[in-house]
Amino acid sequence: MRVAATSSAAEQLVSANIVRSTGWKFFPPSHIEEVAAFNPDLVYLGGVYIGNYSDWQGYRAILGDARRVIMHWYGSDVVQVGQFHREGSKGIIDWLNSERFLHIAPSGPLRQELVETLGIETGDPINVPAEKVFGDISLPAGFVVGCYMPPQRQKFFNMKIIEKALSPREDLRILFYHWLPLMEKLEYKGTNAEMRFCLSREEYEKTLADCSCLLRIPAHDADSISAAEFLMSGRPVVSNHDLPMWPRLVNEQMEAPALVEAVISAKDIPVSAAVREFYRDRWDPAKFKARLAERVKVKWPEVEL
């Protein structure tokens, strides 16, 4: 079975998390001719980031004539495609609902959102796996708030709210991190922050170990890998979204005092053994392919992943 895996905006996740756990062949989205020459039996598409006609044409090109395509939605792509549809693209719905596509939602809320926004039925969710499963990791001596922050998406990840709430708190230490380089200056003005960007995998794992909790309050989210990694290692997550077995600690209004209160509360919230084991199982890369194969078998009984 020749499976080509690709993505136009989540290449890191597909190449590191999907391909390594499945053995599939990864193709950058610009390698259209190489995909055609590979002549895949099936294409795995990680994230469906279509915001305009140019994006749509790019997806059509990379998918080519493939008869079977797994569209694995990743999170904010649901919002993006929904906006594209509302702005007048009626054909996108017919295209997405064609028989060649098997749609996979990454979480329960995203499954419902796909139905309500685009009329797409996806079945039970399958999340993108972590690169590895973490066991228990000792917490650092001092309280450190880790904050996942893509530098080019600070508005989406509510940096202004974080800056307003936490920059005056000299008693709190904040550690902003991401694997991307710091291409844009962070809006955070406080002196209580450390910045770690362009992280290697080893540097990321050290960063996780150096943090006491995760702060992640984006405008929209799936069941994130970062949250899963922090929880499986025994670190609480301060989020504005409910996660499986882990309710949000930040309310919808996200006022600065309430955000500070939620962050401080994480000092005293233990992550139970049941929660840690749940996230280790659900995000285990060794189990991803088999779980996806079950869904593929329902759609295409003749296909063996």
Image: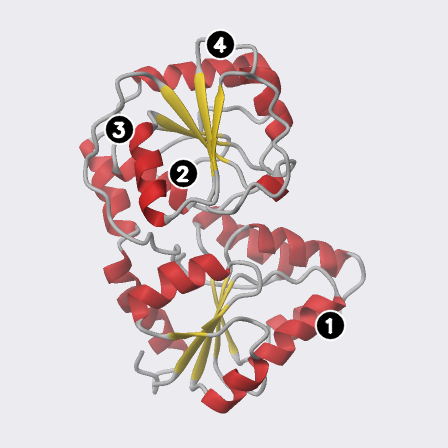
Name the quarter where the C terminus is drawn.
bottom left
Mark 4–mark 2 contact, CB under 8 Å? no
The residue that appears at 31% across and 37% down in the rendered structure is: 206
In the rendered view, tell whether residue 289 sits above or below residue 220.
Answer: below
First in sequence: mark 2 or mark 3? 2
Q: Position of residue 194 (x, y in %)?
A: 47, 26
First in sequence: mark 4 or mark 2? 4
Q: Amino acid at mark 3?
A: Val
Report the front residue among 113 and 184: 184
Mark 1–mark 2 contact, CB under 8 Å? no
Label 1 – label 2 distance at C-alpha? 33 Å
In the rendered view, tell whether residue 130 sits above or below residue 166.
Answer: below
User: Is residue 39 in view from this perspective?
Assistant: no
Look at mark 1 in the image and give the residue it sits on. Answer: 91
The residue that appears at 56% across and 16% down in the rendered structure is: 167
Q: Amino acid at mark 1?
A: Gly
Look at mark 2 in the image and give the residue it sits on. Answer: 243
First in sequence: mark 1 or mark 2? 1
Secondary element type, mark 2: loop
Mark 1–mark 3 contact, CB under 8 Å? no
Tell me if mark 3 has few (under 14), some (14-19) or many (20+) residues whose alpha carbon lies within 10 angstroms of its own: some
Look at mark 3 in the image and give the residue it sits on. Answer: 271
Residue 170 bears which disc, if any? 4
Label 4 – label 1 distance at C-alpha? 53 Å
Tell me if mark 2 has few (under 14), some (14-19) or many (20+) residues whose alpha carbon lies within 10 angstroms of its own: some
